[in-house]
Amino acid sequence: MKQRKNSHSVNWHEIRITMGMQRILLTVLSLWMAFAPAVAEAARIKDIVTFEGIRENMLIGYGLVVGLNGTGDKLNNNQFTQESLISFLERQGVNTRGTDLKSKNVAAVTVTARLPAFARVGSSIDVNISALGDAKSLLGGTLLATALYGADGNVYSLAQGPVTIGGFTAGGDSGSTITKGVPTNGFIANGAIVEREIEFALNDMNDLSLGLRNPDIATSHNIALAINRQIGPGTARVTDPGTVNVSVPASYSGDVVGLLADLERLNVETDQVARIVIDEATGTIVMGENVRIDTVAVAQGNLVVKVEETPQVSQPNPFAPEGAETVVVPRTEITVDEESDNKMAVLEKGATLRDLVRGLNSLGVGPRDMITILQTIKAAGALQADIETR
């Protein structure tokens, strides 16, 4: 009798093939993850552009700080402080014309602030205070009501309040003093109240302009592509490397704020010009990742010349002729020392920023010497980057 084949029997051959394929796929996936190029980091549109109309405005005013402990302006040396004080007292009903004022508790100051976009009447903003005259410190002073003006000459804010400073000055009877920070600069947190608004109807706009903080053709092109993919073809177009124009679609008519909210969250791959920025005053060097160099050999050598003066005293012998005197005879020793263990680093063509820094560090190059080396490599035509010196 034939035995019926079990329908639940296991085909081990097929299982071995399936497991083998899985191992192959896992191996291929691991290799791909190990050698796949890294995905370029993306930035949000809101972090790399400014939107037309959404901006701060500068405010400035002139005022008086009172209540100083003898550290204010000397009125005899600062005529503008004296005139401002006299005018203030006259507005309060006090006539001091022709009086010899000698107060040292008043200082003339400039008051500056930034009016944020869409700031409303009654909101508060921070203000910065800076002395105009020869005041020594604004510590403990109070700013009198000061009008802050915009570029159009209108008053947009009114500032007043106690001044906070980040430094101090201390001295003794002997005349020695110590100063920390800048005691003639201060600020008042939320020290000004907005009195006038800047009208701007954002939702009535039909077109928007996005200004790149770092203009670049590739970045602006990527921004336009991202917007067109999200909102619709033809919505955005590049007008120049620093500007992307966006037409408000019919679906966002009257809701430009909603359009901006959708746009600013989009991620865009940014690009930048290969540039090296050098601050010679502090010895700071900042290099972008796109900096490349051609094949070049770099050596750093230090030639040290030492001049040592070792004067010697020459005294006359016991039986020296009369008139002989003790004299100082100069002795000069000059040595030249050139380090013999200097190394030469060879950087191959196409070397990256990491290779460049590693090669220069291998020579023991400090920031100051690195500045000279980078400028020399650029002069040799081997550095494919712009050098900006500040």
Image (tube, grey):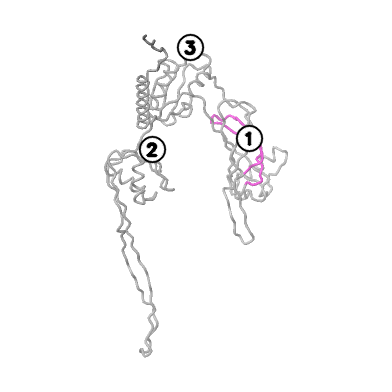
Which residue is labeled 1 in the image? 190
Mark drawn on residue 324 = none
On whether residue 139 falls in the magenta region, the answer is yes
Closer to viewer: mark 2 or mark 1: 2
Q: What's under tag 1, amino acid-wise?
A: Asn
- Is the stretch drawn in magenta largely helix, strand or loop? strand
Q: Which residues are magenta?
A: 138-164
Mark drawn on residue 250 = 3
Q: Earlier in the sequence, mark 1 or mark 3?
A: 1
Q: Is residue 362 above or below residue 200?
A: below
Nearest the viewer among 150 and 306 is 306
At horizontal 53% and vertical 17% (from top left) the residue drawn is 203
Q: Earlier in the sequence, mark 2 or mark 3?
A: 3
Q: Circle 2 — which element?
A: loop
Q: Is residue 119 above or below residue 113?
A: above
Q: Circle 1 — which element?
A: strand
Closer to viewer: mark 2 or mark 3: 2
Q: What's under tag 2, amino acid-wise?
A: Gly
Which residue is labeled 2 in the image? 288
Nearest the viewer among 146 and 194 is 194
Q: CA distance from mark 2 to mark 3?
A: 41 Å
Neighbour class for label 3 at 10 Å: few (<14), some, many (≥20)?
few
Q: Circle 3 — which element?
A: helix
Neighbour class for label 2 at 10 Å: few (<14), some, many (≥20)?
some
x and y percent of residue 354 in the render?
A: 36, 41
**Would residue 227 be found to the left or right of residue 332 on screen?**
right
Q: Residue furthest right?
A: 93
